[in-house]
Amino acid sequence: MRSAVSIRSAPAFLSTRSLTTALLYLYCNVKAGLLVTNALMILNRRRFLSKFGLDDVNRLQEEGPLKQQAGGLLMAVQYLKIPIIACNLVTIVFEILLGGA
């Protein structure tokens, strides 16, 4: 007895609607990360970070590991100015095209 071959549709995780939803969630997460990175970039070393002792690299060597990590992150973000500007421009274009998704 031969069984009939049934044609099945694509799995649910490959449907167009779920893929679109997943991509929009990913885009929203990337946009949230970009906003946090922008917020870290605008912190002024002399005015804001000196209150917490995060403005001097040499002083960070004497502090605890959490303060070293925070200071290192804040100083590393300063090197991302050009890529962040490019990401901001791409995000602005997507927002204009998608209508503020």
Image (cartoon, rainbow, N blue to C red):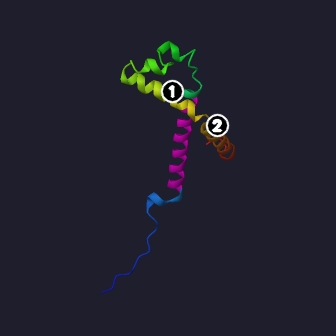
Name the spot of residue 52 as percent of width and height, x first. 47, 15
Residue 92: x percent and y percent? 67, 40
Tell me the amino acid under the disc marked 2.
Answer: Ile
Is 31 in the magenta? Answer: yes
Q: Residue at x 51, y 45 (%)?
A: 26
The quarter holding residue 87 reads: top right
- How far across and down, in percent of the image, does residue 85 sit? 64, 37
Residue behind mark 1? 74
Q: Is residue 26 magenta?
A: yes
Part of the protein shown in magenta: 17-38
In the orientation shown, which residue stands out farthest toward the bottom? Answer: 1
Q: Residue 85 has which mark?
A: 2
Looking at the rendered structure, the kind of residue marked 1 is: Leu
Looking at the image, residue 27 sits to the left or right of residue 1; the answer is right
Q: Which one is nearer the viewer's eye here, 92 or 21?
A: 92
Residue 84 drawn above or below residue 12: above
Q: Is residue 38 above or below residue 12?
A: above
* Above or below, 18 relative to 48: below
Q: Residue furthest top?
A: 51
The residue shown at (57%, 22%) is 43
Residue at x-position 48% and y-position 22%: 57
Q: Which mark is residue 8?
A: none
| Quarter in which the N terminus is drawn | bottom left
